[in-house]
Amino acid sequence: MKVLALHGAGGSPADWDPVAAALAGVHDVVPLPVEGPWDWESVLDRIEPHAEDNPAVIGMSMGGMVAALWGRRHPECPAVIDIDGHGVPTQPRRYLDPAAVAAEIDALREAFRAHGQPELQQALEDLDCFEVFRDVRCPMLLALATRPMPGQALFEPYQAGLARDVATLPPNIEVVRLDATHAVALNDPPLIAKLINDYLPNR
């Protein structure tokens, strides 16, 4: 099956090379650049020329969010696989008690923006992935990392809110939890290849 592969923020199409190698030709993986301007509909429009023959779409982190947007636009898509792309920790809506972590959210937002690409950071913060997920009609796999990255701020309160929101997802979205960090697609390509091989048959 043809699979369009979308990288995370700050990444590149080459991030998918180890996963493609681990798949050993079982699927035709086509890594694409995910670039601004950061209007999400225009991002999807730039994917459209690569989507002949109705491919599956997989994304890591930001790319997973875009893959879900693709699934919402294309209910005929055979499958979407989203690797830990469910929002950003600067979104107050993702917490059980946003007021309790408001100062930490503000500090993290400033840290993110200090690294550049403020337009992208704002676009990610404005995107409510769970609104998108609830509108997806095609089969979708949402893979959730359960271990924090070193120094990852707000991980535990974010995970608590995430658990609340995951419980609201429709039945066409299958959720799997990985004993891995957010960087799982980069750190464990064979695991991601196995997810793809387990999920895509008969789609």
Image (tube, helix red, strand yellow):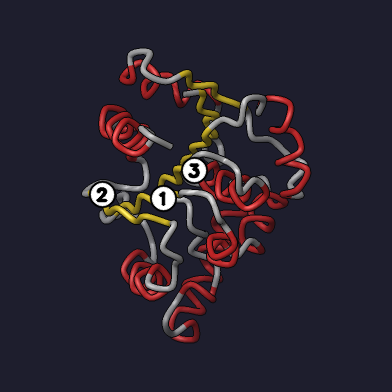
Q: Position of residue 91 (x, y in %)?
A: 55, 69
Nearer to us in this view, 180 or 177: 177
Residue located 62% across and 54% down the image: 113
Residue type pointed to by label 3: Val
Residue underneath mark 2: 178
| Proximity of marks 1 and 3: CB atoms separated by less than 8 Å | no
The amino acid pointed to by label 2 is Leu
Give the image location of residue 119, x and y in percent. Answer: 72, 51
Q: Residues within 10 Å of mark 2 (few under 14, many from 20)?
A: some
Residue 103, above or below 48: below
Cβ–Cβ below 8 Å for labels 1 and 2? yes
**Residue underneath mark 3:** 80
Name the residue beneath numbered marker 1: 84
- The residue lying at 26 percent from left, 27 percent from top is 190
Q: Which mark is residue 121?
A: none
87 horizontally vs 164: left or right: right
Depth-wise, is mark 3 or mark 2 nearer the camera?
A: 3
